[in-house]
Amino acid sequence: MIRNPSEQLEAYLDGQGLKSTRQRDEILRIFLDAGHHVSADELYRLARKSMPGIGYATVYRTLRLFTEAGIAHERHFDDGLTRYEPHAKDTHHDHLICLRCGTIIEFENEQIEKLQSDVARRHRFAVQNHKLELYGLCESCQPKKRKS
Amino acid sequence: MIRNPSEQLEAYLDGQGLKSTRQRDEILRIFLDAGHHVSADELYRLARKSMPGIGYATVYRTLRLFTEAGIAHERHFDDGLTRYEPHAKDTHHDHLICLRCGTIIEFENEQIEKLQSDVARRHRFAVQNHKLELYGLCESCQPKKRKS
DNA sequence: TTACTATTGAGAATGGATATCAATATCATG
DNA sequence: CATGATATTGATATCCATTCTCAATAGTAA
Ligand SMILES: [Mn+2]
Ligand SMILES: [Mn+2]
Ligand SMILES: [Zn+2]
Ligand SMILES: [Zn+2]
């Protein structure tokens, strides 16, 4: 049941009675090889290269569409704009975010996940999704140690 | 070295060459007994009761001031507006957030904190702050189990 | 009091995201 | 292939939270 994103999009459009368009296909292609965690504005700039007439609204709408179709994940980091990443590997992961250069490192930690659900259970809370973000400085942004 | 918030505010204002005003004192009082996690708008409405002429800008500025003074903590949950909570007990804590009624439950978990810093160390990442939020339904917002 | 400034409040401005709407593209149907 | 129904697009207006601007006012040290 593994489908590539294009097929997944077509299937979703079909199922919802929506239409396949040049813009949607092209934006998907660009989104997938843009690398991770792009904002709508970044994607808009990229998209304009191959589609000069593209509008902001279309990019926003298309990213929302991808999210509904399960192709993209919406992320809200602390920089105040929505970012999207491909939902390829559908394994959940969390993030280390560099406050200086913006680099984002992904990680998974089974033990933390386990402890989280323990906390939730203890409070009789039904978790639907969660977010763990560590903000700070990545290795190359840290002040260098000087020899002693 | 334990200071109550009013003293802390006065000390901060003093140290920065800023002035003590009726608005700042009153907003602090209201903020402290408003309970947790108020938005600027909520606080504005509360403040208008005792200070009908108060302006939005003043509330926003004052909350930022409290944050700089270490009296308040700024929180960015996923509902798109900034919330503030008193920094009274200066123990770090994380949040369970009900998506239906908005209730927020606080928790601390030493083991999770420990595992987080392990992850960071492994990536040679210098964490400055972090955020762990579990979104879902609180106990009273969950569909009731029916007897079997 | 005075004089110097920090602060305030009204309203304008900002920035990201969404809504509106006429023109256009897609696509099932004949 | 032509047609008609309708989903989509792009320009732009609008929204909303927050910040900025600036003239009037209030705090404070002298
Ligand atoms: Mn990611
Ligand atoms: Mn809290
Ligand atoms: Zn960095
Ligand atoms: Zn609830």
Image (cartoon, coloured by chain):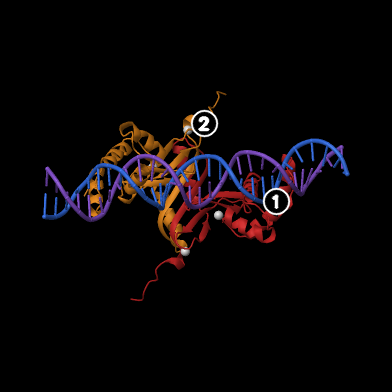
Chain colours: A orange, B red, C blue, D purple
Q: Secondary structure at mark 1?
A: helix
Q: Secondary structure at mark 2?
A: loop
Residue, far top = A147
| Chain hosting mark 1 | B
Under mark 2, the amino acid is: Gln
**Residue labelled 1 has its Cβ within 8 Å of some atom of ligand 2:** no
Which disc is residue B119 wearing? none
| Chain hosting mark 2 | A
Q: Are marks 2 and 1 on the same chain?
A: no
Please indicate, yes or no, whether residue A91 appears anywhere in the rendered image.
no
* Left or right position of B40 against A110: right
Q: Where does residue A134 sit, x and y in percent of width and height? A: 48, 43
Residue behind mark 2: A142
Please indicate, yes or no, whether residue B72 appears anywhere in the rendered image.
yes
Q: Where does residue B99 sit, x and y in percent of width and height? A: 45, 59
Where the C terminus of chain B falls, by quadrant?
bottom left
Q: Where does residue A6 sit, x and y in percent of width and height? A: 24, 43
Q: Nearer the viewer, residue B25 or B85?
A: B25
In which image quadrant can residue B47 be found?
bottom right
**Residue labelled 2 has its Cβ within 8 Å of some atom of ligand 3:** no
- Can you say whether B89 is above or below C26 in the image? below
State the residue at coordinates (73%, 42%).
Answer: B18
* Left or right position of C3 against A126: right
* Left or right position of A42 against B59: left
Under mark 1, the amino acid is: Arg
Give the CA separation, mark 2 to mark 1: 37 Å
Q: Where does residue B146 sit, x and y in percent of width and height? A: 36, 74
- Can you say whether A90 is above or below B124 in the image? below
- Can you say whether B62 is above or below A48 in the image? below
Q: Nearer the viewer, residue A148 or A51?
A: A51
Which disc is residue B24 wearing? 1
